[in-house]
Image (cartoon, grey):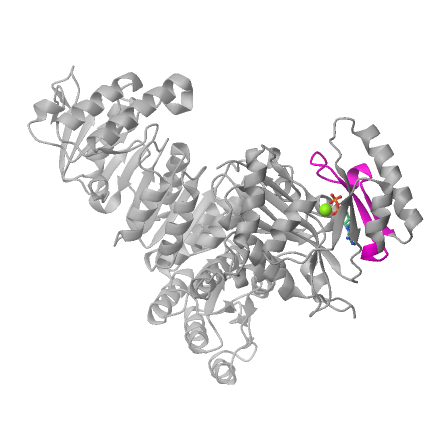
Amino acid sequence: MSLQSFFNPKSVAIVGASRQKGKVGYEILTNMIAGGYEGKIFPVNRKADSIEGLTCYRDLASIGETPELVIIIVPAKFVSGLMEECAKAGVRSVIIITAGFKEVGAEGKRLEEEVARIARRTGIRFIGPNCLGLIAPSHKLNASFGGDLPTPGTIGYISQSGALLAAILDLANANGIGFSNLVSIGNKADIDELDIIQAFGSQEETRVIAGYLESITDGNAFVHEAEQISYKKPILLMKSGGTEAGAKAASSHTGSLAGGEVAYESAFKRAGVIRCNSIEQQFDFAQAFANQPLPKGPSVAVITNAGGPGIMAADAIEGEGLTFAKMSEDTTKKLAENLPPAANIHNPIDVLGDALADRYECALDVVLDDPNVDSAIVLLTPQAMTQAKETAEAVVRIAKKKTKPVLACFLGAKKVEAGLDVLRQGNVPQYDSPESAVVTLKAMVDHVRWRNRPKRVVRLFSVNRRKAESIVERHLRQGLLEIGEAEAKEIIEAYGFATPKGSIATTADQAANIAHQLGYPVVLKIWSPDILHKSDVGGVKVGLKTEQEVKDAFDLMMYRIPKKLPEAHILGVLVQEMVRTSGKEVILGMHRDPHFGPLMMFGMGGIMVEVLKDVSFYLAPLTAEEAKQMLVNTKTYHILKGVRGQEGVDLEAIAEGLQRLSQLVTEFPEIKEMDINPYVVGAPGTTAIAVDARITVEKK
Ligand code: ADP
Ligand code: MG
């Protein structure tokens, strides 16, 4: 169902409209009237005949026609009854402003569920409860108590916090920022963030989707839909309140390093959602995306009338990983012809402190024509001769003619005020500092890169799924939720991983026999379903070179570990071939996030992984590019690539390992978390080996 009735209704009933100043029912009614809403308004209130000059109705039935949108402001305990009344009157769209639901406790939660049930049964869609309402400036609809109607614009805003929306509205109104719509979704008992984002996605009037979220109802649907919409319209989100619940309960390395925050971060990356760290930054980004074309590349030109800010911009460009544009000869020649001899004709172009508007106009015009330039930042400081207003007019004029983004940074306050008005009218975004302009350009460049990334193709490896399935199923059947090293390795072998040879010994003699067959040196590892991290309890002994060493190590383990862990069920000792590569130890892992599903991890491995915390995450299923990107996103990457004459390792093998693991966890939703740690990788061309693995399963 389209939500258009919410944004552009022909008539609105306000149930709980009030004559009393300061009451929400009064504020909403007067906001509706003050906004100049052109449809019909029906205040509903049992006790009044008229409010603010409008006829008041006793109930919905007595209106005599069906309002397209109903706003409910009555106390929580009456809302269910009213929903039934709405259904009888044929109402399809409702905004429930009323608070006192899920957010206040069990009784409120029960009421909210009841309201949602009635809505589902009767086909009503509703926003809220516990929200601030909805604003659609282009339809002069202010169905909220958030503040004055802002000017119409192209930003669609969605907020899970009513209070924050009120602040944003105030700030936007003070700065003349326009919106297509603003929606406060409150407890989102029916319509949630995704419904609104989808509605914005298909609205002509919305070019940029922005919002503040605390949680996402359906992680998978969100990633999938937001990804589609991001190709057409940028989605800029602030997100707070990461859920750490998942991390606390984890027993794997990956689980303890992956909090809810990481999952959100990965989901946003995957869906192309641009994350904003503050309201200011969100406005900075939104204005550029809404009003300027997207840059084709990372090359930035800077035009300034003072050296200092030019250097600040240059530093920021470098710091953000953008390119400081190198002008073509043609450009420097034209600039030399048109600017005074003392001017700097190379980036940052310094038109000098006495520059009037004409120098800016000429410089910007020439620079934007340069094929080496993808975007421009115009810096201005108010000096004695500076024409802030005229310069702004010139900037607007040129920006309109070109197809490259132009961002302004007029520094100062009173002296540049007239210029700022002109920039705003002319849709050239203005920034408080060179840095914030650069950070905005960086967000635009990244977004373009995201849009142009290769189509996602997930490679499917041929594997022995049956084998893995039988082990997983047996564990689940027996209620064994931790799959230890020996069997975890059988599972990953079925998915194409190489592992060291080895078998289980229950006596010292047996251990020596196995060692003899494997060839020395060997490794001994304690085998117990109750011991997750073997080294921690002295359960790993590497580099055993003789029969005697093996026997001694066996006896020592069998003596010491039961003393340390009397409860642990010890099945024996794993005698394993010693992996002798000069390789590096990395970790490949997965933690299943409750909202977004399998979250893959890569990082520097071995026993120090949780100390170093040099890890990166991405949602499965992984493409080859995403797997490689996971490597690049860690510091370990530089070591793995080879530093200071050291030979690098087989990066492809790691990326392939991540993809194989991604396939395993995608095909087995029963796998809750797992680590391959260490995964030992050697020089390119050598086989990477999964030296240790552990898997936690759960019933699905
Ligand atoms: P855990 O993680 O349970 O403590 P591991 O099997 O990962 O036990 O062993 C700990 C460390 O011992 C590994 O990080 C690795 O450095 C070393 N190690 C274990 N098995 C081998 C092996 N087969 N060959 C070489 N080194 C090994
Ligand atoms: Mg390990």
Say whether residue 368 is magenta: no
In the figure, 75 relative to 151: above or below?
Answer: above
Residue 385 visible? The answer is: no
Left of 569 or right of it: where is 384? Answer: left
Identity of the residue drawn at 13% across and 19% down: 58
Residue 624 coordinates in the image, percent (x, y): 54, 63
- Where does the magenta region start and end? 517-543
Identity of the residue drawn at 63% across and 37% down: 482
Residue that extends furthest to the left in the rendered view of this protein: 64
In the figure, 355 relative to 39: above or below?
Answer: below
Residue 135 coordinates in the image, percent (x, y): 28, 40
Residue that extends furthest to the top in the rendered view of this protein: 47
Residue 521 visible? The answer is: yes
Work out which quarter of the rendered image holds the N terminus and state it: top left
In the figure, 188 relative to 657: above or below?
Answer: above
Judge by depth and name the residue closer to the eye, 312 or 322. 322
Say whether residue 540 is magenta: yes
Count how many numbered circles sit on residues in the image.
0
Identity of the residue drawn at 78% across and 29% down: 565
Residue 541 coordinates in the image, percent (x, y): 84, 46
Left of 169 or right of it: where is 143? Answer: left
